Amino acid sequence: ANARIRNFIFSRDKKFLITRNYDSTICVYGLPGGKQLNFLKQEKNVVNVQLSPNSKWLVTVNDSKIYKLWELQTGKQQD
């Protein structure tokens, strides 16, 4: 994805870089190297992204306060 980056976070272990983009996408990159591992899309404007302490789960919330839980390495959304 070539979307403009709104902000970014690093995992505690520095193995992942997660970007929150202006087009409501989330990109997950592996470090070192920066290879894109996952591309996540949430409807509407994503306003926050938080990573679990063990770097397994990613939580996103949009401006309608809809939360989504994603498995970081697979990019699968959890129900």
Image (tube, helix red, strand yellow):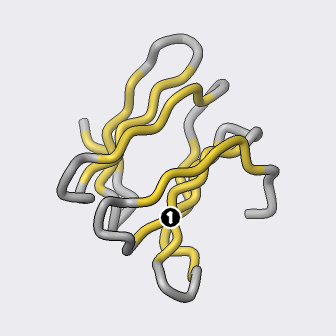
For the C terminus, the quadrant is top left
Seen from this angle, which residue lies furthest bottom? 33
Q: Taking 11 as reference, is 19 left or right?
A: right
Residue farthest top in this picture? 64
What's the residue at 58%, 59% (across, down)? 27
Q: Is residue 10 above or below residue 13?
A: above
The amino acid pointed to by label 1 is Leu
Occupied quadrant, residue 71:
bottom left
Question: Which percent across, then down, holds residue 69?
Answer: 31, 39
Q: Position of residue 19 (x, y in %)?
A: 59, 53
Position of 11 with respect to 24 (left or right) is left
Pointer 1: what residue?
Answer: 17
Q: Residue at x 58, y 50 (%)?
A: 8
As displayed, is residue 15 above or below residue 20? below
Q: Is residue 7 left or right of residue 66?
A: right
Determine whether the residue tagged by mark 1 lies in a helix, strand or loop.
strand
Q: Residues within 10 Å of mark 1 (few under 14, many from 20)?
A: many
Quarter of image, res 16: bottom left
Q: Residue at x 50, y 64 (%)?
A: 17
Q: Which quarter of the rendering shows the N terminus?
A: bottom right
Q: Residue furthest left?
A: 54
Q: Percent x, y for residue 26?
A: 57, 50
Tally of marks:
1
| 8 up-or-down from 39: above or below | above
Residue at x 33%, y 68% (from the top left corner): 73
